[in-house]
Image: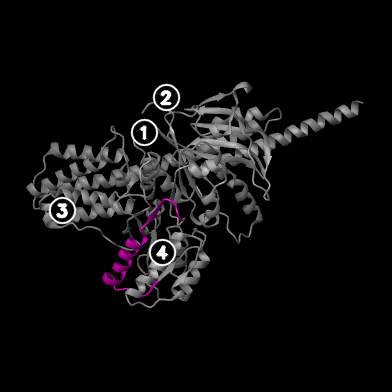
Amino acid sequence: MNKNSKPRIIGIVLEDIFKDFSKELIHSVNNAIPEDSNIRTIIIAGKYIKANSDSPAIVSYSTVYNSIFRFDELCDIDGLIIHLGSMSNRKKKVIRTGYSEKFRSIPKVFIASDIEGETVINYDNELGIREAIDCLVNVNGLTKLCMLGGRDDNIDARARKQIFFRCLEEYGLEFSEDNYEKTDMSDQCYPAANRLLERNPGVQAVFCVNDSVAKPLYEALHARGLEPGRDVLVFGFDNTKMAGEMIPPLSSIGAGNSSLGKKALEVLLCKLDKKEVASESVPTRLYGRESFSYDMYDYTTLEMLHISHSFIYRMFDDCFYRYKTESFKREQVDLRRLFFEFISRMLKAMKNRYMSTENFDTIGRMIDVFFEKGAMEYTDAIKLVKCIEKLQMSMNLQQKSPAANIMVNRLFQRMKDRAIYALSEQRANANDAHYEHIKNFQEFFALISSADSNINVVFRNIDKLGLKNNVVYMYEKPIKYDLSKQIVFPETVLLKCVLREKELYLLPKERQQCNINEMFTRNELSLKCRSYGAFPIFYSDILYGVLICELNDDICDRGEFISQQLGRAIFLNNIQKEGMYAKIKLSQIASK
């Protein structure tokens, strides 16, 4: 990559950045960027506004927050990947025409959309749903199936409902609207889950339109003394990390060999290179877990005895299922190959009925490296343990040598121990980071709340907010948002400060002004960073600027909160300054 060349800027426009689906979409796009390419992604995420929201304050907040969407047409962006979910129905006219000629000319790829005339990447919803229902009916012999669905303005929710009803009809099962309950597709739909269960006593399985709605369904089942996976089988859609973290882990339908984000980036890069492209569908499959047992492979004696390469790799792909959609730098350890090495050596020891001490130590070191290099990031803990136990049981049945048997079982135990250690280390690090963020925020507000503080104190302490790389742009004058009018942004903004590799730089006044369309392309951002998030800085209906920060593991969760606190700090500072001016003016009047 030529560091002096202008990077390609890919905008990823989303409905909400903190949803699990959005996080994994961002990860899959960024992960698919070729290593030697000069590409930077910028995340532009807004807020879904419920049409029947009970809170005017939340609607107002979300509306002002959505001003960030204007930057996909104001700033220099080479291409756009757009996933607006339930917002796309309302935004179709805007998406078709754009606010400007500039927006209309930007190459775009849409995810999960039905906009005519545009390049779209959608799930093939039918493959995964049919696979699940076929197993429920033909393997498990179930006949009473229900669905927690989604919003009518969501293309995937509509498609999944139609496919679900069509499958029931084809299998000759009784179905009606009583089998179905609409939700807002969030984890706050407990009443909807409750209504579905009340109408369907004796339900045997429930299909959830996405993983989020399975959470309140679990709660509703527990309230009735029912256990997901034992009394009622449950499966969701999207196969997010959350699915593997639920108790019991949620079976879920997800992408097969390629993710939506990876496919969208591939198509968009072809567009940017002036190649012919077409809309595509990403195949789906069911990933079985405790809530609905479903195995994609068996441990056959013949494959184990012959130490089949395809068998070992198939086992890895199913257990460490997130790994296959990853792309890696050349210097990184190939975990798939490493897994093959130590499992094949264990199988050979089983076959030969002998394992030397040297081989035992070598395999042990391989297992340690495997987990040290992040293997647990690509699987679910319970799924891995079951996989290990299943393989261990099958190998023990074939072992004839007690000595080899003991050594192999010690290696299996080592795998479990290393997995548990890796998970506990992840959680300890997350807790440490959480408390560090709290401490830094306390210090930040203590400093900016002092009697002699001014607006520059806010920028001088940006490094207290737990960011590593970021820039802050401010409007020369705050903008009051008018709900009845389209917001008009200035042509220039002020670059106030740059945080690069935790080193803070405050810009002098003469270097601050720049064109608003250059915000995503300026080279103040660290060249080591490939992805950034843009967050509006505002308080109430007053817009102050934009925070652009490196997109690391937790910024999807914390970015909005950080920009909120910046907006609050600037607002309070302005109030304090106005109060001081008022006091000075009063003292001047009194002295006269």
The answer to whether residue 134 is magenta is yes
- Cβ–Cβ below 8 Å for labels 1 and 4? no
**Which residue in the protein does label 2 denote?**
4
Number of other residues with Cα within 10 Å of mark 3, as a class: few under 14, some 14 to 19, many 20 or more: many
- From where the camera sits, is residue 208 visible? no
**Which residue in the protein does label 1 denote?**
37
Residue placed at 44% from the left, 29% from the top?
6
Which badge, 4 or 3, comes first in the chain's sequence? Answer: 4
Is disc 3 placed on a helix, strand or loop? Answer: helix
Question: Can you give x and y, in whole percent of width and height, for residue 222 in the image?
Answer: 44, 66
Q: Which amino acid does label 1 sit on?
A: Ser
How many angstroms separate mark 1 from mark 4 (CA)? Answer: 37 Å
Q: What residue type is labelled 3?
A: Met
Question: Can you give x and y, in whole percent of width and height, for residue 464 in the image?
Answer: 55, 32
Q: Which amino acid does label 2 sit on?
A: Asn
The answer to whether residue 5 is magenta is no
Q: What residue type is labelled 4?
A: Arg
Q: Nearer the viewer, residue 574 or 5?
A: 5
Is disc 4 placed on a helix, strand or loop? Answer: helix
Which badge, 2 or 4, comes first in the chain's sequence? Answer: 2
How many angstroms separate mark 4 from mark 3 (CA)? Answer: 41 Å
- Cβ–Cβ below 8 Å for labels 2 and 1? no
- Left or right of 239, for residue 14: right
- Left or right of 32, for residue 98: right
How many angstroms separate mark 2 from mark 4 (CA)? Answer: 47 Å
- Cβ–Cβ below 8 Å for labels 3 and 2? no
**Which residue in the protein does label 4 denote?**
160
How many angstroms separate mark 3 from mark 1 (CA)? Answer: 45 Å
Question: Can you give x and y, in whole percent of width and height, for residue 278 in the image?
Answer: 37, 50
